[in-house]
Amino acid sequence: MKTSSLPLTLDPRAALVIVDVQQAFDDAAYWGPRDNPSCEANIAALLTRWRETGRPIVFVRHNSTAPSSPLHPDNPGNAFKDIITGTPDLLVRKNVNSSFHGTPDLHAWLQENGIKELVVCGITTNHCCETTARVGGNLGYRVYFPLDATHTFDRTAPDGENVAAAVLSRMTGVNLHEEFATVVTTAGLLEQVQQPATAR
């Protein structure tokens, strides 16, 4: 889908919020078919660039309350994927879709650090990533959503019809763009983020 061009300069304090990039989502037997095989590589590229340029990084981990879920803290799938390396500026733990409804309080941390722009990526596109972007937009943040640095899975509609992951991802882009967030590409972000951020 068509994406918007970024403003001339992305705020050097824009935080990269990486949502739920956890090993549980590698279980195709549990989740079903997915879209966007480039998702993880794009997330890794964003993480590397943010770290190289000294910009703020937030990791978000989903701790399911259901013992049978692969995302439950007692299960190995709760761990981050190998691409999620290093120590973030903030680690948020949550058990709902929104990264703003976890511990520590993401909104409070962003406010304390004077951060007004977010880049939201991760898994899954239409659940925790979209919800985080929506809430962030409602809270007054300028949110950028690199759709190609997210992925999701096929879902069954209420009428029983299968809806392909790629269709769901596209609808997330339509839902968010110019309403809650600006939908962009990983390449577009990397082009903007080349110089070190200003001192924190």
Image (tube, grey):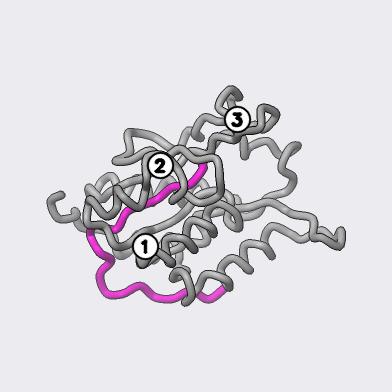
- Say which element carries label 3: loop
Q: How many angstroms separate mark 1 from mark 3 (CA)?
A: 33 Å
Residue mark closest to the camera, 1 vs 3: 3
Q: Is residue 175 left or right of residue 53?
A: right
Which residue carries the number 2 mark? 59
Mark 1 / mark 3, whichever is N-terminal? 3
Mark 1 / mark 2, whichever is N-terminal? 2
Going by the picture, which residue comes out furthest to the right? 160
Residue 114 vs residue 85, the one in the foreground? 114
Q: Is residue 190 left or right of residue 30?
A: left
Determine whether 108 is above or below 139 in the image: above
Residue 103 vs residue 187, the one in the foreground? 103
Residue 170 vs residue 45, the one in the foreground? 170
| Residue 174, image x, y percentages | 58, 73
Which residue carries the number 3 mark? 72
Residue mark closest to the camera, 1 vs 2: 2
Residue for point 55% across, 27% down: 73
Label total for image: 3
Could you tell me the amino acid type at mark 1?
A: Leu
Could you tell me the amino acid type at mark 2?
A: Phe
Examine the residues drawn in magenta and state their main secondary structure: loop
Numbered tag placed on residue 3 in the rendering: none
Residue 156 vs residue 98, the one in the foreground? 98
Could you tell me the amino acid type at mark 3?
A: His
Numbered tag placed on residue 189 in the rendering: 1
Q: Mark 3 near mark 2, Cβ–Cβ under 8 Å?
A: no
| Residue 90, image x, y percentages | 33, 40
| Residue 55, image x, y percentages | 25, 50
Q: How many angstroms separate mark 1 from mark 2 (CA)?
A: 18 Å
Q: Which residues are magenta?
A: 1-20
Tell whether position 200 is magenta.
Answer: no
